[in-house]
């Protein structure tokens, strides 16, 4: 699938954007909610997100060893990206970060075919304050991975970019709330 930003915006607007009163994962109150799982688990949406993020990854330099992020939100994004990469014969792997290390087996927090020292990109659906993706960054770095950047589907323009910059990381997103005529709250 070829990435088309307007197609993604249209799909987000019709499938993911909801108006009302919501409490976000960051604890902030909002007058709208973006349920990006309705996009990342949608046949067209998954393809658009994967194609867009893969293009952003490739535009940033050499292909990293892997992409991944915080379970559960980043899991379908990761799976879609590695599938599209595989269709293009690109050796891009995926990984996932558990909220807590597993309490049994090998006790891992970072799962997947990655090794310490490898360069990775963190993926996320919605960026608000950046807290969830920063937890993924911290766990990946504790495992020994080198995080190059963070890529999200949509930026709520609520401080996430500054939070990543403070860690020396660049944030890229496929869209922002301004693409929907919404200003930061």
Image (cartoon, rainbow, N blue to C red):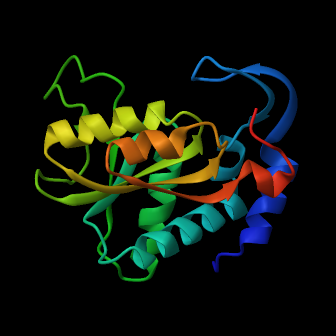
Where residue 139 appears, as percent x and y from the top left, is 26, 35
Say if residue 97 shows up in the picture: no
State which quarter of the image contains the C terminus. Answer: top right
**Residue shown at 52% from the left, 65% from the top:** 53
Viewer-nearest residue: 24 or 86: 24
| Quarter holding residue 51 | bottom right
**Residue shown at 77% from the left, 21% from the top:** 22
Measured along the vertical axis of the image, is residue 73 above or below residue 86?
above
Report the side of 73 relative to 170 (left or right). Answer: right
Measured along the vertical axis of the image, is residue 149 above or below residue 21?
below
Viewer-nearest residue: 146 or 164: 164
Report the side of 68 relative to 158 (left or right). Answer: left
Say if residue 113 shows up in the picture: yes
Viewer-nearest residue: 166 or 89: 166
Report the side of 58 relative to 49 (left or right). Answer: left
Where residue 166 appears, as percent x and y from the top left, is 37, 42
Viewer-nearest residue: 158 or 64: 158
**Residue shown at 31% from the left, 74% from the top:** 63
**Residue shown at 65% from the left, 42% from the top:** 37
Measured along the vertical axis of the image, is residue 21 above or below residue 54?
above
Measured along the vertical axis of the image, is residue 37 above or below residue 129?
below
Where residue 174 appears, as percent x and y from the top left, is 62, 61
State which quarter of the image contains the N terminus. Answer: bottom right
Where residue 172 appears, as percent x and y from the top left, is 51, 59
| Quarter holding residue 149 | bottom left
Count every numbered label the image shows and give the total.
Answer: 0
């Amino acid at each position: 699938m070829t990435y088309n930003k307007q197609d993604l915006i249209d799909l987000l607007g019709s499938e993911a954007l909801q108006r009302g009163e919501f409490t976000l994962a960051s604890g902030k109150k909002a007058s709208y909610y973006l349920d990006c799982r309705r996009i990342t688990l949608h046949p067209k949406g998954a393809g658009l997100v994967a194609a867009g993020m893969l293009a952003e990854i490739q535009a940033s330099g050499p292909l990293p060893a892997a992409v991944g992020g915080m379970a559960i939100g980043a899991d379908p994004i990761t799976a879609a990206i590695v599938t599209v990469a595989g269709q293009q014969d690109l050796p891009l792997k995926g990984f996932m970060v558990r909220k807590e290390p597993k309490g049994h087996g090998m006790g891992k927090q970072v799962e997947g075919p990655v090794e310490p020292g490898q360069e990775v990109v963190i993926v996320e659906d919605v960026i608000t304050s950046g807290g969830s993706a920063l937890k993924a960054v911290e766990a990946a770095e504790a495992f020994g991975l080198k995080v190059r950047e963070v890529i999200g589907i949509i930026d709520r323009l609520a401080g996430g970019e500054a939070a990543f910059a403070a860690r020396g990381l660049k944030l890229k997103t496929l869209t922002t709330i301004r693409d929907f005529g919404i200003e930061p709250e």
